[in-house]
Amino acid sequence: MGEIPIVDFWNCGLDVEEISDENCTKTGEAIYQAFAKIGFVYLKNTGITREQIDEVDSTMDEFYKLDASTKKIYARDESNFGYIDFNVESLNPKRPGDYKEAFNVYYTTDRKWPDEHVPKFASKMRKFCELCRKLSLRIIKVLTKGMKIKDSDYLMKCHSRMNGKDNFTTLRFLHYPPIPDNVTLKPGQLRLGEHCDYGSFTLLFQDNVGGLQVEGYDGKFIEAVPIPDTVLVNIGDVLQFWTEGRLKSTKHRVMVPDIQSARNVQRKSFGYFVHPDHEVVLSGIEYGASCLDHHERIEPEYEEPVTAFGHTNNRFQSSYIN
């Protein structure tokens, strides 16, 4: 199966004003080949800087340090904005709740932001969301070329409201605190259960601790080793729908370390989860000849066509523990 490929995005990144057709096609094909191989790719030279990443990371650290009762003021609601406590979410519903806490930043929420406890929280998060939106549009542009999609505007039109209303695109922070010796986990409990992401694709920003594992198309898990100054991008369910399963949404997880010294180390990551607009119907789209020749088509999950809203809402219903 090999390792997760690395693609240099320098000629299509945010520092480039105009992407040439040649660079767009070449980079898009490289990303597509990585997705066809394992569903994940590291992108380097995206144009998002270490300083920009560190700013939101340190801002979120301030929130995590608040006492439990204060954090619960901002508990997640049906808008998908807010704090998620330990054992509240189980991304693999067959396992106990994940041993983690999280915060979902939904750009257009009407909810109160935690600025009174973490100064400038909202403005810093919105600024980073906008950076991620711009990078995501670049990825959509090159992937359209790399996958030889016949309607060259289709994916752009499907993602017209990222960071807007009627679109589930979310910046999501995950915190895996140390697991002390005196904490007994439930049988089968993980830091993050095996799951596929629900949207089109995800931009993941990892710390240097490691622990994320990715399931290859051969069913074996490999380590997604942190690589400095890269963004890890993976396929979500929506891209699987659009390719009728020829590209597959890849399962991933975060295990609990076997060694106590590793359990005593916290882990952090955050991802920008790219979703189509709510009303987009998730059915197969047309591609150029010989593009999707890597995997056999699989039967769709739903008997009737489903919208982006319907699919993601179904996943939310199964992953949050009442």
Image (cartoon, helix red, strand yellow):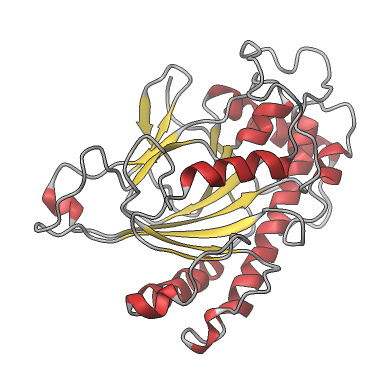
Q: Nearer the viewer, residue 142 or 216?
A: 216
298 versus 112 height, above or below: above
Find the residue positioned furthest to the left. Answer: 182
Q: Is residue 98 left or right of residue 275?
A: left
The mark total stands at: 0
- Return the x and y of residue 74 as percentages of the image width and height: 49, 74
115 versus 152 height, above or below: below
Q: Is residue 258 left or right of residue 67?
A: left
- Return the x and y of residue 92 as percentages of the image width and height: 41, 38
Q: Nearer the viewer, residue 318 or 182?
A: 318
Tell me the quarter of the image containing the N terminus.
Answer: top left
Q: Nearer the viewer, residue 72 or 203?
A: 72
15 versus 40 height, above or below: below
Q: Is residue 26 left or right of residue 209?
A: right
- Return the x and y of residue 93 as percentages of the image width and height: 41, 38
Q: Nearer the viewer, residue 20 or 295?
A: 295
Looking at the image, which residue is at 23% across and 58% down?
265
Looking at the image, which residue is at 75% across and 42% down?
140
Looking at the image, which residue is at 14% across and 60% down?
180
Looking at the image, which residue is at 77% across and 27% down?
283
Q: Is residue 277 left or right of residue 224?
A: right
Asked if one can make out residue 54 in the rendered structure from this viewpoint, the answer is yes
- Return the x and y of residue 107 as percentages of the image width and height: 67, 67
Asked if one can make out residue 198 in the rendered structure from this viewpoint, the answer is no
Q: Image quarter for residue 170?
A: bottom right
